[in-house]
Amino acid sequence: MGAYIIREAYERIQQVHSERKNRMATKAEKALLTRKAWVLQEIGWEYNDEYYYRGNSEGGTPRKVYFAHDRALVDCAKMNAVKLKEEKASEYPMEQSNGEVVKEFFEVVEVEVC
């Protein structure tokens, strides 16, 4: 799924580049032209019958690709807030080995688009 998202990002870069090369680029378009994207991904928490830990599942599950870093961070914060609210309502919150309750369920990762 990750390769598919990257391919979509690359195709979008090519499209924006050809459409906008003679006009001033917006912030998002500049990010496209520098071949950077930000992936909002769900963190792959795993459970071992005692506590939750970040699994080795290649970082997480991609949910959406952004070409504006600030937009990705805003959406990530919103999604974390919603999930945390659901988690607080749960009878058994997700607890880590250090005793802290999991507070981040989504993260933003910068990727280079080839």
Image (cartoon, rainbow, N blue to C red):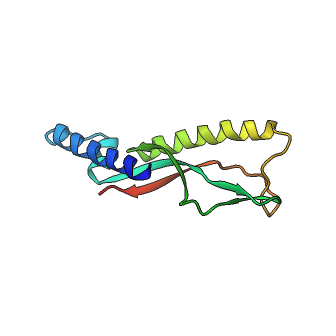
Q: Residue at x 66, y 50 (%)?
A: 104
Q: Residue at x 29, y 57 (%)?
A: 114
Q: Say whether residue 61 is left or right of residue 51.
A: left
Q: Residue at x 53, y 39 (%)?
A: 75
Q: Residue at x 68, y 39 (%)?
A: 83
Is 85 located above or below residue 58 in the figure? above
> Residue 69: percent from the left, percent from the top?
44, 47
> Residue 2: percent from the left, percent from the top?
43, 51
Q: Say whether residue 72 is left or right of residue 16.
A: right
Is 27 located above or below residue 2 in the figure? above
Q: Residue furthest left?
A: 22
The image quadrant of residue 97 is bottom right
Q: Which residue is nearer to you in this view: 102 or 63?
A: 63
Q: Residue furthest right?
A: 91
> Residue 74: percent from the left, percent from the top?
53, 40
Is 32 located above or below residue 114 in the figure? above
The image quadrant of residue 113 is bottom left
Q: Say whether residue 110 is left or right of residue 16.
A: right
> How many tags in the picture?
0
Is 94 located above or below residue 24 in the figure? below
> Residue 19: percent from the left, percent from the top?
18, 37
